[in-house]
Amino acid sequence: MTDGRDAPVTAGAHRDFIRAIIAEDVRAGRHGGRVVTRFPPEPNGFLHIGHAASINLNFSIAQEFPNARCHLRFDDTNPETEDIRYVEAAIEDIRWLGFDWGEHLYFASDYFEQMYGYAEELILKGLAYVDSSSEEEIRESRGTVTEPGRPTPYRDRSVKENLELFRRMRAGEFPDGAHVLRGKIDLASPNMLMRDPIFYRIRHSPHYRHGNRWCIYPLYDFAHPIEDALECVTHSICTLEFENNRELYDWIVENTSVPCRPRQYEFARRNVDYTITSKRKLLQLVREGHVAGWDDPRMPTIAGMRRRGVTPEALRAFADMIGIGKAESRADIGKLEYAIRADLNHRAPRVLCVLRPLKVVITNYPEGQVETFDAPYWPHDVPKEGSRPVPFSRELYIERDDFMENPPRGFHRLAPGREVRLRYAYIIRCDEVVKDASGEIVELRCSYDPESRGGATPDGRKVKGTIHWVSAAHALPCEVRLYDRLFTVPEPDADEDVDFLTYLNPESLVVIPDALIEPSVAGDPPGARYQFERLGYFFEDPVDSRRDRRVYNRTVTLRDGWAKTAERETEARREQKTSPRVEGRAAAPKATPEPRVTRAGDEGAEIVAAEIAVEVAIDAAADARAAAERRKSAAATPPATGDVQGAAGDVAPLVDEVLAEFPDRVAAYRAGRTGLADFFVGQVIRRAGGKADPALVKRVVQERLG
């Protein structure tokens, strides 16, 4: 007989199998129709991106179902590693993500007295005993995966002796390691965890909340089910690594007089490429100075991502995008970066900032004259209004990388004798290059075309390059920190024989102390976000920035440069595989595995669908709370299946609507730009709320377009 936790779940109206299980429990009236989840972090480090997915899952479920709530509980049963500052940081992180637990904030340490009572109950039932064996002896007595365990000399102690020893352990009469309390279960169990697991150990360490009140502490596998039962949690959701622990979880619940019977459910962890989430290794990075702290913007911690400029909406959208499942997998970091870009594109106004300034003197521009250009804050695809005045004068600064004295073919920026557009301003031509005694370029002397205001070319000449700039007299000094991925490989801790520090990216932080930014930012409040045109999205550092010396952290680039490199490598491998073999020539070496990097938007309808799902999640963030309240007040009947549109007739009206709205693009498609099919697919999926089958939509689009 099964309780449904391992049964296959049919995908229907619910986003994942966990929600489908909960919906069925609500429909069947299990747990009295209640839904209680919990997020139980151990306060031994800062929360990271993996925790963000679990937070999003547990708290979102509490918002989506009627009579539901989510508890925040700190699993503080290990006094040697826990600290109040980790508790405070976690509370800040979860609130920043947009979730609240109301009055349901708990600490496992507040249940120590009840846990002790349940331990004595097991002793009195003959289901637990005090073992005085050494740690090594206990480990050896458990046997192996092919051999059963064997009893230690202390397994058959009497109930009276066990109870007396356990009480003396609590009284502090024994040193660390002298005794442990073990469950008396099954030494022949195929599940090694059931071979008399340890429930309590002696630790003469002060607890950060209770001082020296306790010197024995329960282990996680004993404490956790009791905590859930005392809080009457209904659905104890954890990651797949605890699947084997479930049998012990159920055993403890069934053999103690706890007031409720919670159930444990597991979902697969989604490890993110180019990151690590081991708290031990993250702590090592902090302690050894490889990063500046837990909130270093390169860290995968929620605090680090917040300081980098990532928004809670982007993190929640990413969590929804990767979803949850039953099989371990890795999440492409490109999807996280896409979610960040999609969100910031709607909230970060554009400004001009020059990172590595090169002086430009416009020789035919009047000295002392200043004019302003009205520059839009928002790109054309963002439905927002607003602009800022950008001053222009005789002396400017451009990016040093935007000039080359001897440019290669395909370089369309500034060079001697060449023209380039200055963003929003004029077309200029480089007439002279000024160098110092060492040969370093210190200044460019250029001339401008007065008829080209706004970049116009009345005579019809072609100017391919457009670069950004700032006025020398008006720009504000700032420091820019270019953050990149902390590691150079997707799985830095995959090989236990190789130190993960080997893969630290030496270019994960590049500090540019003498950048210049346009003056429109002067009146902005601290912590502003911007898109530096042509450079990326940036966030004013909340710790180090000052009004007289602003510091900006790069949140994400405008495009995935890592994916471009991977794409070139992939294309080279394809050519290598398809090129004819020359007789007598040795076979080409086998290609290395293709990097797990995806450039958002270039992988066809399925990726378009995923990206649209992110945008749908972001667009819905503003009214999510109201929608959640409406759902909670609605009846508990599960929605009907068939939410995902799965027939051509379902999506055809949406396809027709999209094609009618974009006649120019329809004409372009029929003229040969067949890549626009994915654009139409994305528009249809957006109108379907992200729930249409992308392959089906693409087929209907292609049929309609002939």
Image (spheres, grey):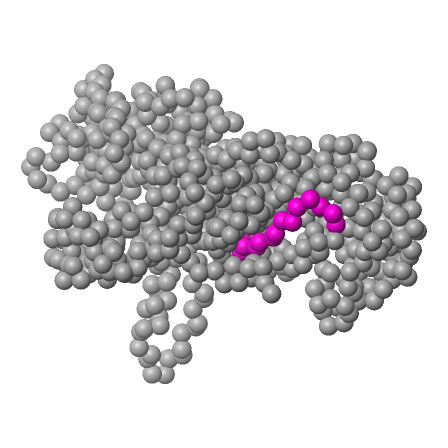
- Residue 574 appears at what percent x and percent y? 34, 68
Residue drawn at (38%, 61%), measured in percent from left and top? 569
For this orientation, the residue located farthest to the bottom is: 584
**Quadrant containing the C terminus in the rendered view:** bottom left
Q: Quadrant of the N terminus?
A: bottom right
- In the figure, 567 relative to 623: above or below? below
Residue 173 in percent (x, y) is at 92, 41
Q: Nearer the viewer, residue 512 or 429?
A: 512
* Residue 361 appears in the rendering: no
Toward which corner of the image does residue 634 lie, by quadrant? Answer: top left
Along the viewing direction, whichever of 255 and 585 lies nearer the viewer: 255
Q: How many marks?
A: 0
342 lies left or right of 268: left
Q: Is residue 381 left or right of 288 when viewed as pictured?
A: left
- Residue farthest left in this picture: 459
The picture places residue 89, in percent across and down from the top left corner, at: 59, 33
Name the residue rendered at 68%, 42% in the picture. 230
Image position, residue 129 (x, y; %): 85, 54
Please give left or right for residue 62 compared with residue 582 in the image.
right
Which residues fall within the magenta stretch?
Answer: 256-273
Q: Where, by quadrant of the figure, is residue 429 drawn?
A: top left
Q: Is residue 421 above or below residue 235?
A: above
* Residue 528 visible (yes or no): yes
Q: In this picture, is 390 found above or below 24?
A: above
Q: Is residue 176 magenta?
A: no
- Taking 228 as reference, is 10 left or right? left
262 in magenta: yes
**Residue at (27%, 24%) from the top-left corner?**
388
**In the image, is residue 567 above or below residue 407?**
below
Residue at 22% x, 21% y is 372
